[in-house]
Image: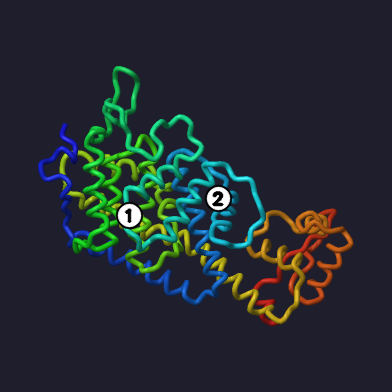
Amino acid sequence: MRWNWQQSDWPRFSWDGTLLAQSEEQFLLGAGVLLGTAKHLGGEDRKRLTVEGMSGEAVKTSEIEGEILNRASVQSSIQRQLGLATPRQRVRPAEQGIAELMVDLYQSVPAPLTEERLFGWHGMVMAGRSDIENIGRYRSSTEPMQVVSGPIGHEKVHFEAPSAHRLEEETASFLNWFNSDDGTDLVLKAAVAHIRFVTIHPFEDGNGRIARAMTDMLLARSEQSPQRFYSMSAQIRLERDDYYNVLEDAQKGSLDITEPLGWFLGCLSRAFDGVEVVLSDVLRKERFWKTNADHLLNERQRTIINKLLDGFEGKLTSTKWAKLTKCSQDTATRDINDLVNRGIIKKDAAGGRSTSYSLLDNETADSA
């Protein structure tokens, strides 16, 4: 079998633009609507949505590779690096590393992607890994780099990457293409870059996460905004089997990648479905605080209200209030009664031994 990188005209991929035009137009339309809606958000809400997007991307790009991270820890690390107020929280090296990658990507979208940055990203992705010898360096084994499945003696080779001695030249060529303007639309270039980098496979591990970061970088350039309001990796995680099948097909033989590009464009468009829920929550939160802008609230009250707006799990009682805000039971009761009297929260219908409370819905709050 001849892999794509063994073709005489590698790495000159080709595709039928007419077959991709509708999918690309659908993605660009969705991206435009999302960015247009986000422009109406206040500065704090825009920051929050950006952090949500970065955190989701960090967690899901790791989950695709089977690594489960604590989202709260990742988000806390991202917030600290962006200079946003956040309580100190213990973060594992893997969570710290992927958060650093997201922030570096966010802050360097227009900057060229260099070998030095690439090695730095690999160090971030591999943080805490003692089983990887070449962290921040090209793989060096003389053995073929293969993706294999099946029992011993009946293995199936899904892909074989170029040998280690070719990596420096292959990566230099890739980075020169990545940073140049060859006339390729940036959305399509993002998908091509993903396929090409995974094919080169320059590192022992972490190639998929870095490829997805590169895709995000080019998409951000296409939108002329470093803020990420949707997570490509979250959608890929939902379609992981198809994702790996598409990559495998793209690396076999032909350099015509029309079908893989069509899948990537469709996957990106489907990623907008998830962000609509997040954006709706952010807009709801913004409307609430505008409606109640005249109310002077203490920090404990604002903390609990934000938790309710973010989707507080279970029932809010005075005991939970006291625990969450680290105050006495009497103080919690005074805080709650004050909000009830102002018409911001309401006492729930009796349904248990403890009285619980919830926010008034938007319609009630608007008329209060």
Secondary structure beneath disc 1?
loop
Count all numbered tags in the image, as a single digit: 2
Q: Residue furthest right?
A: 330
Quadrant housing the N terminus: top left
Q: CA distance from mark 2 to mark 1?
A: 24 Å
Tell whether 292 sits left or right of 217.
Answer: right
Position of residue 218 measured from the top left corner of the image (x, y, whole percent)? 33, 59
Check whether the beta carbons of the residues at disc 2 and disc 1 lie within 8 A of each other. no
- Image position of 41 with respect to 275: above or below: below
Direction left: furthest residue: 8
How is the structure coloured here? rainbow
Give x and y (percent) for residue 30: 37, 67
Q: Identify residue type, mark 1.
A: Leu
Tell me the number on the disc at residue 74.
2
**Residue 55 percent across, percent down from the top left:** 51, 54
Q: Is residue 296 left or right of residue 109?
A: right
Pointer 1: what residue?
113
Residue type at tag 2: Val
